[in-house]
Image (spheres, rainbow, N blue to C red):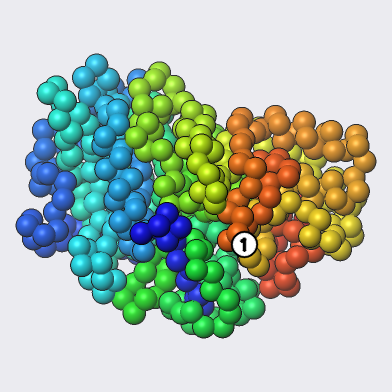
Amino acid sequence: MTRMTRLYKILKVVSAALFALVFAACEPDFDFNTEFEHGRIPGEGPQAGVRQPNEETRNLLLLYSAGFNNLSSYLSQDIEDLKRGWLPGGSRNDDVLLVYSHKLSRSGSYTDKTPSYLYKIWRDASGQVVSDTLKAYCKDTLSVSPTQMNRVLTDVKDMFPARTYGMIFSSHATGYLPAGFYNNPDKYVYGGSVPLAHLSSEGGFVDPYAHMVKSVGVQQEPGLVVREMEIADFAEAIPFRMDYILFDACLMGGVEVAYELKDKTRLVGFSPAEVLVEGLDYSSLASHLLDNDEPDVRSVCEDYFLQYDKKSGPDRSATITLVDCDRIEPLAQVCEGLFEKYRDMIKSLGYRRVQPYFRYEYHWFYDLYDIIAEAAAEQSELESLDAAMNDCIIYKAATPSFMLGYGGFEVERYSGLSMYLPAHGNTELNKFYQTLSWNIRTGLVK
C-alpha cells in the first residue's frame, strides 16, 4: 500500500441539523475475550479512579479519541505510539495521562456498536506499561455529541483534580462550518430540516486522496449515517476552563475556532489546512505535556511540523499554529475596524488572489491577513493587523506547499490563521456564520 492510499477517503454526505441526544454512562455487558482491551476490570486496578492528593502539582492530559469511523485503525495506532513514549510513573507519578477511546469493533463493521472507555496509562516501577479502565460507557454512546464530551470531562475532573488540564481532540473536522455543509454546500439550508447524512459518492467529483473531514468530530452509525458536532456546541460542552486544547483534526486553525474557544482554554493548537494521517507525534507528546513543571505545548506543535517538513513530495504537507486565546481580543478589535472600512472590497474580492488553505473546491478557508492585504488596506493598517496577530500567535509554521498534484496549493503567505471569505461563500452559510462569536464581535458578515 502506497503512502498516498493511506490518506482519508472522502465522504459525500447530506447532514442533519445538529441534534441533542442524552446518553447515560453505563457498564455494558462485556465479553472480556473480545471486547475488553485495557487490562483490568473497571475500578479494580490499584490506581483506577483514585484521587491522589497531588492536585496542587498535578498536570493532567486527556486524549479524546473519537474514532468510531474510518479513522479507527489510525487512532488506535496513535494510542500505541503514545504508550511507546514517555509515560507518567516513577518520580512523576502524580501526573495523569488519560485516554477516552471509541473505535470500531474488530470486525470493522459500523453496524456493530461498541462501548467507549476512559482509561489511565502509566509506567510502573519495572518499566511496564499499565492501563486501567476507569469507566465504560454504553454501546449507544455518541462520542461526538456535546452531552458525551461534557460527561467525560466532568468524570475526568471528578476523578483527578489537577493544577493543569489539557485535551487533545482526535477525529475529523471542518473548522467552523455547520454540520452537513462541507460536502453538500448547495443542499445546506440554515435552520432547515434536512435528512440525516448518509455515505454517498453521488453528485460531484470525488477526490481519490481526500481526507474525510467533518465539522468537529464524526461518528458513523449503522446504515452509514454520519453524526457531527459544531464548534459552538463543542465549546459549550467543556465544563471548566482548560490550559490547552490541541486538535489532531483537519481545518481547525481558523480565527473563528480560536475566538469561540477563548473562554474555554488559554492555548489552542491547530492546523488551518488538513492534517495528514500520521497526525501529531504521539511518541514524544506526553514528555512535553506532562514531564515538565508546565506543559510545553509549543514543542508538541514543533514536533508535528518537523515530522512532515523532513518528508518529500505530497507527504511534505503541514500547517500548524499555537494561539494564546487570552490575547486574541486585540485582534478582534483591529479586525472590527478593518471589516467595517473594507466591507465592500472584502465582499467583492477576487478570491483567486488570496492564500487558500483548502484543496479542490472546498473553498471556505483563506488566510486572514491576506484577505485584508488584498482588500487594499493601508500599510499602517496592515502593520497593526500583523502586530495583533503576532501578539496572540505563539508559534506558526507551514511547509512550502500542501499536497501539490492532489488539488493542493503553494503556501506563499502564512499568517497562521484562516478565515471565511464572504466573496467566495454562499447565502445560507452567511446566515450560519452570523451566529459565530467571531462574527458577532467583528461584524465580518452583516
Residue occupying image coordinates x 41% and y 47%: 278
Q: Is residue 113 visible?
A: no
- Residue 94 location, quadrant: top left
Q: Nearer the viewer, residue 402 or 430?
A: 402
**Residue 413 relative to residue 13: left or right:** right
**Where does label 1 land, which residue?**
407
Q: Quadrant of the N terminus?
A: bottom left
Residue occupying image coordinates x 14% and y 58%: 35
Q: Nearer the viewer, residue 254 or 403?
A: 403
- Residue 267 location, quadrant: top right
Residue occupying image coordinates x 22% and y 71%: 112
Q: Is residue 7 above or below residue 254?
A: below
Q: Is residue 313 above or below residue 398?
A: below
* Circle 1 SS class: loop
- Residue 389 location, quadrant: top right
Amino acid type assigned to the residue bearing label 1 in the image: Gly
User: Where residue 244 appears, x then y in whole percent?
Assistant: 48, 36
Q: Is residue 446 above or below residue 270?
A: below
User: Where residue 358 appears, x then y in whole percent?
Assistant: 63, 58
Q: Is residue 43 visible?
A: yes
User: Where residue 222 appears, x then y in whole percent?
Assistant: 31, 76
Q: Nearer the viewer, residue 354 or 332?
A: 354
Q: Nearer the viewer, residue 323 or 239?
A: 323
User: Where residue 9 appears, x then y in whole percent?
Assistant: 45, 66
